[in-house]
Amino acid sequence: MVSPEQKTIYVASSLAGSIEKFKMFIMECIADSGPDLEKANDNMLFRYVLDFDKVPTIDPKENNGDYFKRLLSVTKPLDIHPTHIVSLRDAVYCMRHGIPLLSPDAGRKCIRAGMNGET
């Protein structure tokens, strides 16, 4: 999970094989965001599919706040883009309204229309 300032808040590296694992990661981030989901922040979640040898290492003993920047230093030159980008706020909205995560109805355009009361 990455803040609007591109600070890495939470990272998991073994999500590449499964969309379901990414959905579980999203749910963990929602759970960790605290009890007041109405105030979910603008953090973003990214899913990349990369060869393991290209993934920057995550040292659990170190502050990995710069991990997203290190990841971008690998992905940009190779023109690799995330397979999924989810805002934490949109994920909370989906959860509250029974919209399956990563479904077509969970697309940003549909979510924003729902948040604005449009049909």
Image (cartoon, grey):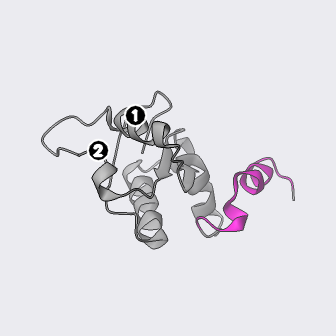
| Residue underneath mark 2 | 56
The image shows residue 35 at horizontal and vertical percentages of: 43, 51
Badge 1 element: helix
**Marks 1 and 2 close (CB-CB < 8 Å):** yes
Check the picture and name the quadrant holding the N terminus. top left
**110 versus 58 height, above or below:** below
Q: Nearer the viewer, residue 46 or 110?
A: 46
Badge 2 element: loop
Q: Crowdedness of circle 2 by 10 Å Cα count: few (<14), some, many (20+)? A: some
Q: Nearer the viewer, residue 13 or 73?
A: 73
- Residue at the extreme right of the image, as rendered: 119
**44 versus 97 height, above or below:** above
Which range is magenta?
A: 101-118
Q: Nearer the viewer, residue 57 or 9?
A: 57
**In magenta segment, residue 109:** yes
The image shows residue 107 at horizontal and vertical percentages of: 70, 57
The three-letter amino acid code for the residue at tag 1 is Ser
Mark 1 / mark 2, whichever is N-terminal:
2
Residue 103 as seen in the image, left or right of residue 7: right
- Residue at the extreme top of the image, as rendered: 5
Residue found at x 82% / y 52%: 117
Residue found at x 32% / y 62%: 14
Q: Crowdedness of circle 1 by 10 Å Cα count: few (<14), some, many (20+)? A: few
| Residue underneath mark 1 | 73
The image shows residue 75 at horizontal and vertical percentages of: 45, 42
